[in-house]
Image: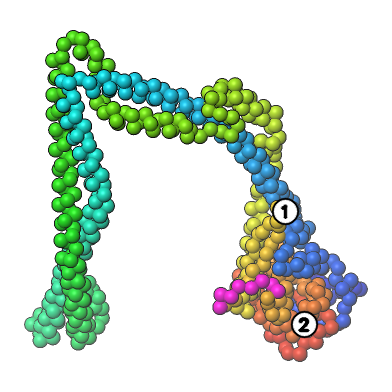
């Protein structure tokens, strides 16, 4: 068909097309229109619920120079699959490396606990010697009692702290709420006062006592300035009445909140007094410890030379009781016993065996050096860039096609979108068609009524031609499966979409040529030239 002459060849006949919309009827064979058919489109509409992306792409790239190479957009799936495979292998390598790090951390943990155990054993020995000192035992006992008292009080404090803070937050929140109510009442009283002031001002104006009216104040009160004085007074009276009602409601809420506050305040005061008393007791004991420790250090200096040498080492560590040190030493022994080790280590004696660690590190090094193809993605930047560029172009085609289709589908209260999905083996893209009716009902293609299916298929074909920029769009019922060759539905589709080619800016430049074979037109169609062959 010549774009300039707008001629349509049907076998040996040539029909000149002069009108924007032309309907050619007769009895035709499909072979006569092979050059106008989009064979890939015919394959696509056989699978409209789930369209293979490669067929979808073919119908565009084979008809448009601008979309040549669009099939490269589908290569992105291969890249993603390769990326996933390589990522999984990298995760295995990371897991192996992580396991090696666990072995190293176990070794450091074992060494650290062993060293701590030695220090505690030394401290315990010194503590036992220190405990035997009669001159310092009384002070040590006092310090220990104070520490015990602090610990006990700290436990009590922690026990009631949550309840105390919860009650405190409740009281604070209720007080804040009451203050908010009082502020709201204050603001509403001012609004009510302003309403009465405005009523008085309007009344004086009516009586002729003043000619000035503060329109800005009326606007702040929500009263329009274009109302009559009587309407303004009624609006202000209503505003004052509404404000009074709100004041009454807020006072009711405020009283209820105050009752709630009065109800929980006694219990809060109990928690508060207990909490502050315990906290004060802890502070007093801490101060006493400081004073007693100063006395302890002074007494150390008062000892003779030999006694100082005997206990000097201990003076460098915190003064802890034998029981405390033994308790900590017991914890260290338990940690050593329960120290987690890798499954690849047979026992704790091998935790610090460097040969095992070196062996694991060499294995990882071998993987990194000799398995490059499993770790890195060997695709050129240009290849990846081209695939992504084509994929973005592919997405753009889908989006543009959706837009054109939905312009048509609005005529029958439908909207559709293409969902890009991948098969279970991650080897192929598919376009899933999803439709939404006016009542938000979701449907797939098979859920549509036969007239809706025919409307969609006709519009799908025309939308493809619009997207490809074919100014003269030739559609024939011979291009679609026989199951959809319903004359009534096809002609109703024409009636609905033809006006759009005059009203829609994106469609004005296109000519429509409908070639219908063996389907009788029983009802006239407006704005269409009919040619019978």
Q: Quadrant of residue 121?
A: top left
Residue at left offset 17%, top offset 69%: 259
Q: Is residue 174 above or below residue 78?
A: below
Disc 2 residue crowd, few under 14, some 14–19, many 20+, Cα 10 Å: some
Vertical order, 487 against 12 (above or below): below
Provide the residue designation for mark 2: 486
Q: Can residue 104 be seen here?
A: no
Q: Position of residue 115 (x, y in %)?
A: 41, 22
Q: Where residue 80 sits: x, y (%)?
A: 67, 47
Instruction: Residue 425: give its label.
Output: 1
Occupied quadrant, residue 177:
bottom left
Of 24 and 150, nearer the camera is 150
Query: Which residues are the magenta region?
Result: 439-446
Q: Measured from the top left, where is residue 461 in percent x and y?
A: 73, 70
Residue found at the very far bottom of the displayed protein: 522
Q: Is residue 151 left or right of residue 337?
A: left
């Amino acid at each position: 068909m010549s774009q300039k002459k707008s001629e349509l060849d049907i076998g040996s006949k040539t029909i000149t097309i002069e009108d924007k919309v032309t309907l050619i009827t007769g009895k035709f064979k499909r072979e006569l229109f092979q050059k106008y058919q989009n064979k890939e489109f015919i394959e696509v509409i056989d699978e409209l619920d789930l369209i293979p992306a490669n067929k979808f792409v073919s119908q565009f790239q084979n008809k448009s120079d601008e979309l040549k190479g669009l099939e490269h957009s589908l290569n992105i799936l291969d890249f993603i699959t390769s990326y996933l495979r390589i990522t999984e292998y990298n995760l295995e390598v990371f897991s192996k490396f992580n396991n090696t790090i666990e072995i190293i951390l176990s070794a450091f943990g074992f060494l650290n606990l062993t060293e701590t155990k030695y220090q505690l054993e030394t401290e315990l020995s010194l503590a036992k010697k220190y405990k035997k000192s009669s001159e310092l035992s009384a002070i040590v006992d006092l310090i220990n009692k104070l520490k015990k008292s602090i610990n006990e009080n700290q436990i009590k404090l922690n026990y009631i702290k949550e309840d105390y803070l919860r009650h405190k937050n409740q009281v604070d929140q209720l007080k804040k709420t009451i203050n908010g109510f009082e502020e709201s009442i204050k603001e509403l009283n001012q609004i009510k006062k302003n309403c009465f002031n405005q009523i008085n001002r309007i009344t004086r104006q009516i009586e002729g006592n003043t000619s000035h009216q503060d329109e800005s104040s009326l606007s702040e009160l929500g009263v329009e300035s274009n109302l009559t004085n009587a309407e303004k007074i009624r609006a202000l009276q209503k505003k004052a009445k509404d404000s009074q009602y709100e004041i009454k409601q807020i006072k009711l809420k405020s009283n209820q909140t105050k009752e709630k506050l009065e109800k929980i305040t006694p219990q809060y005061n109990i928690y508060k007094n207990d909490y502050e008393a315990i906290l004060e007791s802890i502070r007093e004991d801490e101060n006493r410890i400081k004073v007693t420790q100063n006395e302890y250090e002074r007494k150390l200096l008062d000892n003779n030379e030999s006694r100082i040498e005997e206990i000097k080492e201990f003076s460098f560590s915190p003064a802890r009781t034998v029981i405390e040190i033994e308790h900590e030493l017991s914890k260290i022994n338990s940690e050593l016993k329960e120290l987690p080790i890798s499954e690849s280590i047979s026992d704790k004696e091998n935790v610090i065996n460097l040969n095992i660690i070196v062996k694991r590190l060499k294995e990882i090094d071998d993987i990194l050096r000799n398995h490059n193809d499993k770790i890195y993605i060997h695709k050129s930047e240009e290849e990846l860039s081209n695939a992504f560029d084509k994929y973005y172009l592919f997405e753009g085609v889908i989006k543009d096609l959706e837009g054109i289709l939905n312009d048509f589908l609005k005529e029958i209260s439908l909207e559709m979108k293409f969902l890009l999905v991948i098969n279970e083996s991650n080897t192929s893209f598919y376009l899933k068609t999803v439709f939404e009716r006016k009542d938000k009902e979701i449907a797939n293609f098979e859920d549509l009524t036969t007239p809706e299916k025919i409307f969609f298929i006709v519009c799908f074909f025309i939308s493809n031609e619009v997207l490809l920029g074919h100014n003269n769009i030739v559609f024939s019922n011979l291009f679609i499966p026989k199951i959809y060759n319903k004359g009534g539905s096809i002609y109703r589709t024409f009636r609905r979409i033809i006006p759009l080619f005059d009203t829609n800016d994106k469609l004005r430049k296109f000519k429509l040529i409908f070639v219908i074979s063996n389907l009788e037109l029983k009802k006239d169609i407006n704005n269409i030239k009919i040619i019978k062959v």
